[in-house]
Amino acid sequence: MAKWILVFLTALLPISLVALPTSNPGEASFCYDSLFLRDCLSNCGNFSLRGGFYGDYVFNRHTQVDSSISSGDIDKTTIYTNGGIVTLNFCNLLDVYAILAETKIALMTPEAIFTGRSISNVNTVLQTESDFSWGVGGRLSWSFCGGSLVGVDGRYFSANLPISYIKRENVSPRYLEDVSLKYQEWQLSAGYSHRFCSSDGALSFAPYLALKWAGLRGNMDEAVLPITSFTFPYVLHDLVESKCIGYVVGITSLYYQKASINVEGRFADELALHINAQLVF
């Protein structure tokens, strides 16, 4: 049984899925069976190190431009992230983690957002290249009533992505140089989880619900693109969130205290899918 679970976890790692998940609010109390330094914190238990695949696929993050000369919501903002996560756990209560990944962002919206001219409603796509991104965060989890857990999480995510091209509807894409999207997002969340164990204790499942608040800033330095084949010059205004409150539904499956797979969906401020698979070292 253990062999097949490990094979399944290994198969998940290269999945090409890809703005910030919450993960299970009880995760800091799940996987802690470390291979080293057990009970190193004396009366406070042990610490352990986890690592694995981090994939986040945002179908639409609700954003808007932040400018005195143009306003309005971006129709669709997609954010694709593939990478890894390393988590240090203390006392089966606190997780401190780092994310190293690659991210790509696309904006799809009428060009009036960039030109400031309401008569211009032709659809436009702005696409970044895939480039390095990183994040850090921490989580506190408390267990009570035999299987019920609550937790709070805070995290920060950053990426500086070169803009590859901008494409006006029915016009060939225009590739850009020396223009980038500096993307930052920060988030606070809190949630409830309940763990259900199999009769032998080998497998368990923990569905969860969470609420989150998230803010973002996408800085494009108000770059002006005097593209002659387009109707008007484009000004790349900064982006901010248009919705900041969301909710999360997810489930975590665990094998003893050694491995976990987490899947969650996020709604309201964004429509997104997150998958996370981790092993304890």
Image: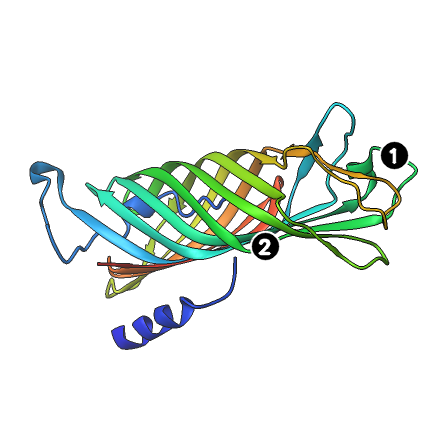
Please state if 257 lies on the left or on the right of 192 as rendered. Answer: left
Provide the secondary structure element on which disc 2 rests. loop
Q: Nearer the viewer, residue 43 or 86?
A: 86
Question: Which of disc 2 and disc 1 is earlier in sequence?
Answer: 1
Please state if 280 lies on the left or on the right of 189 as rendered. Answer: left
Q: Position of residue 121 (x, y in %)?
A: 88, 43
Q: Give the distance between the C-alpha atoms of the residues marked 1 and 2, in whole angstroms.
A: 28 Å
Q: In the image, which disc is placed on residue 117?
A: 1
In the image, residue 234 sits, relative to residue 174, either above or below, namely: above
Q: Residue at x 27, y 76 (%)?
A: 3
Q: Amino acid at mark 1?
A: Arg
| Quarter residue 44 falls in | top left
Residue beneath label 2, please? 129
Q: Residues within 10 Å of mark 2 (few under 14, many from 20)?
A: some
Q: Residue at x 61, y 39 (%)?
A: 269
Q: Quadrant of the N terminus?
A: bottom left
Please state if 210 lies on the left or on the right of 105 as rendered. Answer: left
| Quarter residue 262 falls in | bottom left
Q: Residue at x 85, y 47 (%)?
A: 228
Please state if 42 lies on the left or on the right of 243 as rendered. Answer: left
Q: Amino acid at mark 2?
A: Glu
- Residue 19 seen in render: no
